């Protein structure tokens, strides 16, 4: 049988559903934003990596929209409830943003650096996501909450005195999902999963291609390129779902056929599974 060397053959990723894929994709793009924001580092990033980065950005946007679109519509009688829940979530995210901005303005403190980093991760475009349509905003909020719980941000924000804010955020987000019929599905609502599966498959493929392109930067002759590649791949290498906190981390992406991995199988696999609608909530 003829061997092939496509991204599917070469790269194993952690098993992802729609929510975890959105969270991981966001982390990867956040890491890339930090690298590309450094002019010196950005000059060493090949065109192929930039192209893969652009494709990943597009795929993440498509998955976010598909995840929101497949959610059941808000019943007319819950419109007022949804509006109130939306305003509550908006206010809490805004309050958390203000806390991080406040800390970041105080020079010389380790908390200032922590706040600046957390703000870049959670609010790369400020509070624009709070102005989206209800379902899209819920998906964006859900992604950020997954980021909080998956990469240690929760503990860091508690160090800044934001523990009570996070508690209220989780409660409000849960209420938001219920008001939209996400965590408490509307009886008889039809949920379309085909587009979501396609969008998820596209994102997984974009991630694999990104890993292959970035891995090509590793160079024995140029340690700086290797360091940049490690920074770009760190979110994938260190990824573990929220449910795995306290358990050994999942294996980093590698060559198909290696033992010890908990990621997806290589060529011939059915691909990532799409959870039922209620599984995407917290």
Image (tube, rainbow, N blue to C red):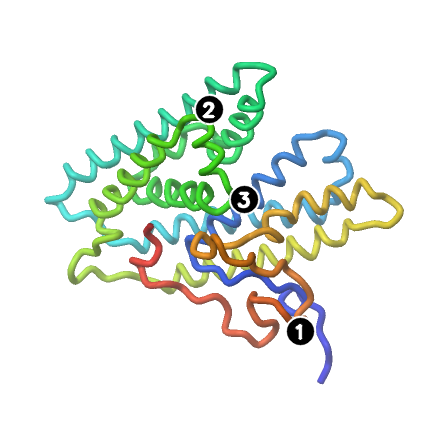
Q: CA distance from mark 1 to mark 3?
A: 26 Å
In the picture of the structure, the residue carrying the numbered disc 2 is 100
The answer to the question of whether label 1 and label 3 lie on touching residues, with beta carbons closer than 8 A, is no
Q: Residue at x 50, y 69 (%)?
A: 271
Return the mark for residue 257: 1
Q: Secondary structure at mark 3?
A: helix
Q: Residue at x 25, y 52 (%)?
A: 183
Of the image marks 1 and 2, the number of the one nearer the N terminus:
2
Q: Residue at x 34, y 30 (%)?
A: 165
The answer to the question of whether label 1 and label 2 lie on touching residues, with beta carbons closer than 8 A, is no
Is residue 18 depicted above or below 49 in this figure? below
Residue 48: x, y in percent? 71, 49
- Classify mark 1: residues with Cα within 10 Å, few (<14), some (14-19) or many (20+): some
Residue 159: x, y in percent? 47, 29
The label nearer to you, 3 versus 2, is 2
Seen as rendered, the residue at the extreme right is 221
Q: CA distance from mark 3 to mark 2?
A: 19 Å
The answer to the question of whether label 3 and label 2 lie on touching residues, with beta carbons closer than 8 A, is no
Of the image marks 3 and 2, the number of the one nearer the N terminus:
3
Return the mark for residue 271: none
In the picture of the structure, the residue carrying the numbered disc 3 is 27
- Classify mark 2: residues with Cα within 10 Å, few (<14), some (14-19) or many (20+): many
Figure quadrant of residue 2: bottom right
């Amino acid at each position: 049988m003829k061997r092939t060397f496509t991204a599917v053959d070469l790269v194993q990723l952690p098993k992802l559903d729609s929510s975890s894929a959105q969270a991981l994709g966001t982390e990867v793009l956040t890491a890339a934003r930090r690298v590309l924001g450094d002019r010196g580092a950005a000059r060493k990033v090949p065109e192929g990596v930039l192209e893969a980065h652009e494709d990943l950005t597009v795929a993440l946007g498509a998955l976010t929209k598909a995840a929101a679109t497949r959610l059941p519509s808000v019943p007319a009688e819950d419109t007022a409830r949804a509006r109130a829940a939306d305003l509550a979530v908006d206010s809490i995210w805004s309050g958390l943003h203000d806390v991080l901005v406040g800390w970041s303005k105080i020079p010389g403190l380790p908390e200032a650096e922590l706040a600046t980093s957390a703000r870049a991760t959670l609010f790369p475009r400020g509070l624009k996501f709070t102005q989206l349509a209800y379902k899209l905003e819920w998906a964006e909020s859900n992604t950020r909450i997954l980021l909080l719980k998956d990469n240690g941000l929760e503990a860091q924000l508690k160090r800044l005195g934001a523990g009570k804010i996070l508690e209220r955020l989780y409660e409000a987000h849960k209420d938001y999902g219920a008001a939209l019929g996400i965590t408490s599905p509307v009886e008889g609502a039809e949920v379309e999963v085909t587009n979501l599966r396609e969008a998820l498959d596209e994102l997984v493929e974009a991630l694999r291609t990104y890993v292959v392109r970035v891995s090509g930067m590793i160079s024995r002759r140029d340690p700086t390129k290797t360091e940049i590649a490690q920074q770009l791949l760190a979110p994938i290498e260190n990824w573990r779902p929220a449910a795995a906190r306290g358990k050994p981390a999942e294996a980093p992406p590698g060559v198909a056929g290696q033992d010890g991995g908990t990621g997806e199988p290589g060529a011939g696999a059915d691909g990532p599974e799409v959870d039922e609608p209620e599984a995407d909530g917290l």
